Image (cartoon, helix red, strand yellow):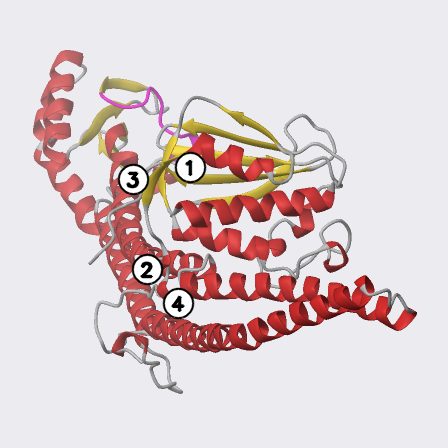
Amino acid sequence: MSPAATPAPASGHRGGLFRRILAMVLGTAVAAAALAAIAGYTFAARFSSEWVGEVVEAIEAKSDELQAAGEDEAALTVIMAELGEKLDAHVALYGKRGRKIAGEGPPHLPHDFRESRDELKQGHPVVIRPSRLAPPGVIYGLQDPATGRIAGVLGVLPRPGFRLSVPLVSVAVMLLVLGAGAGVLSRSLTRRLGNIEASADRIAHGDLRHRIALDTEVPRDELDQLASAFNAMAETVEGLLHGQRTLLANVSHELRTPIARMKVLVEILQERVTTLRERGDDSRPVQRLDQGLRDMALDIVEVEALIADLLTSGRLELRHGAGAAVQVGRFDVAALLRRVAAKVDARVDVTGEPELEADELLVERMLSNLLANARRACPAGRLTLSARTQGEVLELSVEDEGPGVPVAHRESIFEPFTRLDEARDRDRGGVGLGLYLCRQICRSHHGTIEVTDRTDGASGARFVIRLPLHQPARAA
């Protein structure tokens, strides 16, 4: 077993992946909380008691100028602008009833400001809110030195741009931090899970030699442990299948000698039975012996075909289509199709003059199996064997007029020793290795095979083979 496939020992505690997720979530949460605290502090500090004190000091510093300006709107506007620049706010002078006289700000103060007249008379600043969504502001009463009554009210309100700028920027930064943390974690997890999924798909489609690549020999976390365990499982399955195929190939090879002896013995017995019948001995025992030997000869031919399929399958599986198992050469497709079609009286339809780079004997074996199956499915129907090129791919198809293949069985029929209960069953020939061998031949040539309905909608099956016109160079 390779190091990559060595399973990691199971542990009772949570591994690195749990710690990574926990650390990432806690880290982003702490960062977001810190940003929220900073933003809240900044937003609240804008209207803290210190800021209110600054407002009062600024207004008192301008009290002499305000008294000197009197009702001069132009002078008052200049003073309001200076205060607004200093306090970074809108400053306006309002009359007793809250109507604006000069400066920047809303035309009226909120009606509830009148409830604070007593505090304003005592020279205390009052915090107000122009609206529910607006940040708070400050109003300050200006007293008439002669009467001691409130001559006007100064309103200091935040500028409109400040209302949402701090919270919006804070939310954007928090989302950015959270998104960045979640993105890093998600990308790491999805990339590694995607690799495991792609590897599982390759192994499921027959590439048992494939293994999931690991960055380190020692698993870092649960995902590495999963990949390591998956590699170990794949290697075990490959070893079991390799052992079974080796055993099957060896047994098949060893059976060829006794089968050959049986074949010779049957031929000798048939000759003796023929001699007896020629001499006039046509008794019932001789007839039964003659029929039994004929049936035995057919059974031996079937067993020979089965052994030939097993040996070919074994070579392709054990060598993965490499070396002596596949002998690549270039040949005329049309000539091959006419040769195999003539055996079952099939119609040939070839577009152009395609040439294929492949093992001609294996391709002929594959087409012969498909045509034999098709002829068994429709003994009196029409078979069509066609070929056409699509770019760098040769598409071969075999169509029959039989009952077709149900959708539920269109994948399973390519498994070894699988037969349908209807047209393609053992009673009508075959033991379920022909289509399995066809798929192996396709895979050994980097091609595919599938079964569909007929293109014209009529009853029947259509087997479609797609092979590259040129085989990739094989590693030495």
Using the image as rendered, state which of residue 17 and residue 428 is in the foreground: 428
C-alpha span from label 2 to label 1: 85 Å
Q: Amino acid at mark 1?
A: Arg
Verify CB contact (< 8 Å) between mark 3 and mark 1.
no
Dot 3 corresponds to which residue?
168
x and y percentages locating residue 111 in the rendered image: 43, 30
In which quadrant is the N terminus drawn? bottom left
Dot 2 corresponds to which residue?
324
- Which image quarter: residue 182? bottom left
Q: Would you say residue 147 sits in the magenta stretch?
A: no
Crowding around mark 2 (Cα neighbors within 10 Å: few <14, some 14 to 19, many 20+) is few
- In the picture, measured across the screen, residue 44 lies left or right of residue 384, that is left
C-alpha span from label 2 to label 3: 71 Å
Dot 1 corresponds to which residue?
132
Dot 4 corresponds to which residue?
318
x and y percentages locating residue 167 in the rendered image: 29, 42
